[in-house]
Image: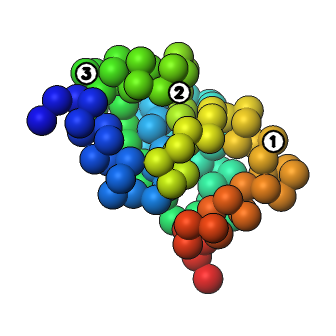
Amino acid sequence: MSVIERIKDQLENNSVILYMKGTPDFPQCGFSGQTVQVLEAVQAKYTAVNIFEDPELREALKEYSHWPTYPQLYIDGQLVGGCDIVIDLYKKGELASLLASVGAIEE
């Protein structure tokens, strides 16, 4: 399976996926940490992928998404954006709605 096929498989099999530096319990950059905090604030159910554990994926995802930085949040297979966009959506109350639309809010 090519790295692009792996990315597509991950996106198809996870309604919400966060490609980040580190893990939710141990983020290795401030932007990834802030994004995790926002997702936890809305009680999101999501899958996290530590890009440091897969350098091939780390590089390929930049091309696939046309987004050069991390973290990258995907909802329903679509790139939502990075930290600033996720925080902005959270402040507007739109992040919870997006997550709820794919059943990714813990009741």
Task: Give the vertical position of 89 relative to 99 (above or below).
Answer: above
Rounded to the nearest angstrom, the CA distance separating label 1 from label 2 is 16 Å
Of the numbered discs 2 and 3, the one sitting upstream in the chain is: 3
Quarter occupied by the C terminus? bottom right
Task: Give the vertical position of 9 relative to 39 (above or below).
Answer: above
Image location (x, y in percent) of residue 5: 23, 36
Q: Which sits in the foreground, 74 or 48?
A: 74
Q: Disc count in the image?
A: 3
For residue 53, side relative to residue 81 (left or right): left
Q: What residue type is disc 1 on?
A: Asp
Of the numbered discs 1 and 3, the one sitting upstream in the chain is: 3
Image location (x, y in percent) of residue 14: 39, 57
* Mark drawn on residue 56: 3
| Residue at 63% over, 33% down | 82
Tell me the residue that label 2 is attached to. Answer: 70
Q: In this view of the protein, can residue 63 be seen by the observer?
A: yes
Residue extending farthest right: 92
Rounded to the nearest angstrom, the CA distance separating label 1 from label 3 is 30 Å
Q: What residue type is disc 2 on?
A: Tyr
* Mark drawn on residue 67: none
Rounded to the nearest angstrom, the CA distance separating label 2 from label 3 is 14 Å
Q: What residue type is disc 3 on?
A: Glu
Tell me the residue that label 1 is attached to. Answer: 88
Task: Indicate the secondary structure of the residue bearing disc 1.
Answer: helix
For residue 56, side relative to residue 28 (left or right): left
How dense is the environment of label 3, judged by Cα within 10 Å: few (below 14), some, or many (20 and up)? few
Residue extending farthest left: 1
